[in-house]
Image (tube, helix red, strand yellow):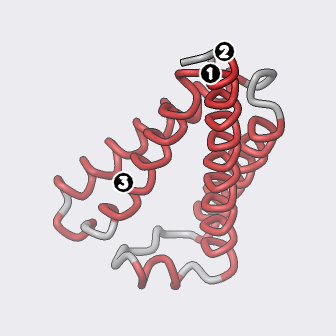
């Protein structure tokens, strides 16, 4: 691979990393808004029970919005916020494992499987686009 081709490949990966981080931010923000604005919607879509007091959904939604903001910072400047990219990769992978384990251990939580798949997809995408250019 020539030096020019390597540079083009590196910038393509950088664009894809930024896109995957923006999509992760949008995913988290939309889910957070749904959890606060219409909590019955994600519960119905994923066949999951709602937690007790709504307060707990608000706390989770706040954390998801904070995560979405961090994703957007990292998407804007992945080199400067490379620590956020590393945490995003690890966090998505651990989240996928946690969702999958909960779905496997609790018969009523099968709706977590698509969420586990989404987290795993984001972890793999972020890693695939970031590791070669770090």
* Disc 3: CA contacts within 10 A as few (<14), some (14-19) or many (>=20): many
User: With 100 as the anchor, is 70 left or right in this view?
Assistant: right
| Image spot of residue 30 (x, y percent) | 66, 68
Q: Name the residue under label 2.
A: 3
How far is the residue under mark 1 from the one under mark 3? 34 Å
* Disc 1: CA contacts within 10 A as few (<14), some (14-19) or many (>=20): few
Q: Which of 75 and 83 is in front in this view?
A: 75
Q: In which quarter of the image is the C terminus?
A: top right
Tell me which corner region of the image, top left, top right, bottom left or bottom right, holds residue 43: bottom left
How far is the residue under mark 3 from the one under mark 2? 39 Å
User: Do the CB atoms of the residues marked 2 and 1 lie less than 8 Å apart?
Assistant: yes
Q: Name the residue under label 1.
A: 6
Q: Name the residue under label 3.
A: 116
User: SS at mark 2?
Assistant: helix
Residue at 61% of width from left, 30% of height from top?
Answer: 9
Residue at 63% of width from left, 75% of height from top?
Answer: 34
Q: Which of disc 3 and disc 1 is earlier in sequence?
A: 1
Number of marks in the rendered image: 3
């Amino acid at each position: 691979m020539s030096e020019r081709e390597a540079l083009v490949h590196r910038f393509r990966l950088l664009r894809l990393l930024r896109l995957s981080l923006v999509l992760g931010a949008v995913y988290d923000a939309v889910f957070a808004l749904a959890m606060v604005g219409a909590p019955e919607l994600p519960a119905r879509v994923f066949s999951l029970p709602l937690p007790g007091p709504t307060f707990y959904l608000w706390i989770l939604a706040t954390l998801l919005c904070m995560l979405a903001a961090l994703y957007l910072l990292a998407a804007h400047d992945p080199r400067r916020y490379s620590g956020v990219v590393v945490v995003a990769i690890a966090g998505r992978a651990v989240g996928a494992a946690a969702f999958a384990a909960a779905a496997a251990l609790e018969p009523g939580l099968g709706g977590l499987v698509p969420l586990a798949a989404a987290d795993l997809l984001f972890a793999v995408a972020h890693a695939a686009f970031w590791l070669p250019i770090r």
